[in-house]
Image: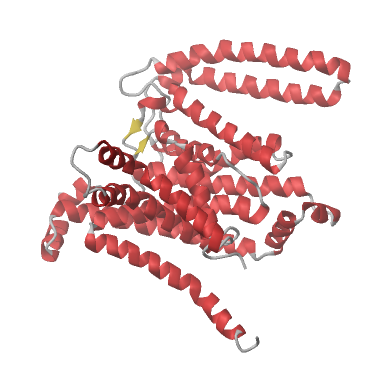
Amino acid sequence: MSQHQPQAASGGAFRAPLLFAAMAALLLLEGTTGSWNSALYILNTGLIAAIMALGVNMQWGYAGLFNTGVVGFVAIGGLAPVLISMPPNTGAFSAGGFGIVLALAVAAGVIALAVLANRRLTFQRRVVVVPALLICGFFLYRAIFDPAANAIEGVNTAAAGNLGGLNLPVLFSWPVGALFAAGAAWVVGKTALGLRSDYLAIATLGIGEIIVAVIKNEDWLARGVMNINGIPRPWPVPYEVALQDSPAFLERAAALGIDPVTASTLLVKLCYTGLLALVLLALIWLSQLALHSPWGRMMRAIRDNETAAAAMGKNVTLRHLQIFIIGSAVCGLAGAMLITMDGQMTPGSYNPLRFTFLVWVMVIVGGSGNNWGAVLGAMLIWFLWIKVEVWGPQIMVALTSGLAEGSALKQHLVESAAQMRLLTMGVILLLVLRFSPRGLLPEK
């Protein structure tokens, strides 16, 4: 046995580099056989997906928290570029901004009074006073909030109809997006983290959908489903038009034999790649430090046996709240980065399939509890999610080439090929759970 141990250790040491090299080869293959624009798009969106996977891995891999409301924290993080970096809607704040602030203050005050009454009063008084406070507070809140929201939505409705932003650099909005998600996670965690894991999953699923529904329907906040376009780019990412107007850039593109439009698009994507990769590497570095610290060992001890950890004097509920907030903040950061790269806020695109289920598949396939595994799983699953949508119809057309033209079976199979990637995700998940249940890069 001792003779085989060094070989096993060597294989384990080379496993991660080999898998990442294979992932890089897939991206290079896409660039050489398809287009470099497509390869860089997959890479950039994959880097953002990796940040989301890191956040979920912190919650599940470190502490065993089953958060199925990831989409809500991504969405609330996506609000930050709108509220921080967009120009203000002239006249909107004076029309109803103070009313919105007053209404939110009233809501917070009513909730605080209800909590205080619930703690201080006897049961007989509590069952009367707390509901009365909440009902009266709700009607007072709506009496202030509704006129203010209607006034804001009435200002330049065709082009804006919302508060607008502070017109600050968009890079400031990224940490603000993390703070937005952290604040929402604190509220969710204080109410839901005392639940058992299956009930926590149900609660976070519902809360995530509530957050998305609010963003879709509150037009005064971010125009709802009417969307917001023209979100500014972060420094140092340039605009394609500015590059194409630059004689120096045109000269370099001509020297490389690339047309200016393609060259400008590639350069913009490469700038995003460098910026996103820098953020991801910083998060991995911090995550690795935390994972291997006494705090990280304590979190894993709580994950493995909450009863034993509590018996050793650890505050399990507080630590769960802490890691839930941190993981959600990372997801909110990814949401702000995604909105920035897309250049638009589209609440209708916040689909739980993409922003919850797919992120969980990334973590499970990559290796729960392993930060590098979460990144690898995110890049691989996202690559397949994008490419299988293209490969599916092509494969189905080839498989049905022997069937007669106009055949009902052939038509049905070709039309159903658009759902091939859902089938592919399920098959990959089953194969990994069967042959490598701890993921491609298991936790050590």
Residue at 19% of width from left, 37% of height from top? 406
Residue at left offset 29%, top offset 54%? 269
337 up-or-down from 302: above or below = above
Q: How many marks?
A: 0
Q: On the picture, is 141 further left or further right than 159?
A: right
Q: Position of residue 175 (x, y in %)?
A: 50, 46
Q: Quadrant of the C terminus?
A: bottom right
User: Looking at the image, which is closer to me, 358 or 141?
Assistant: 358
Question: Does residue 389 appear left or right of residue 64 in this picture?
Answer: left
Quadrant for residue 276, please give it. bottom left
Residue 236 appears anywhere in the view: no
Residue at 58% across, 19% down: 102
Residue 432 picture location, percent across and down = 52, 59
> Left or right of 435: which side holds 243?
left
Left or right: 248 as drawn, with respect to 291: left
Q: Nearer the viewer, residue 357 or 246?
A: 357
Where does the N terminus fall, quadrant-wise?
bottom right
How far across and down, in percent of the image, does residue 403 sit?
A: 22, 45
- The residue positioned 46% from the left and 40% from the top of the image is 353
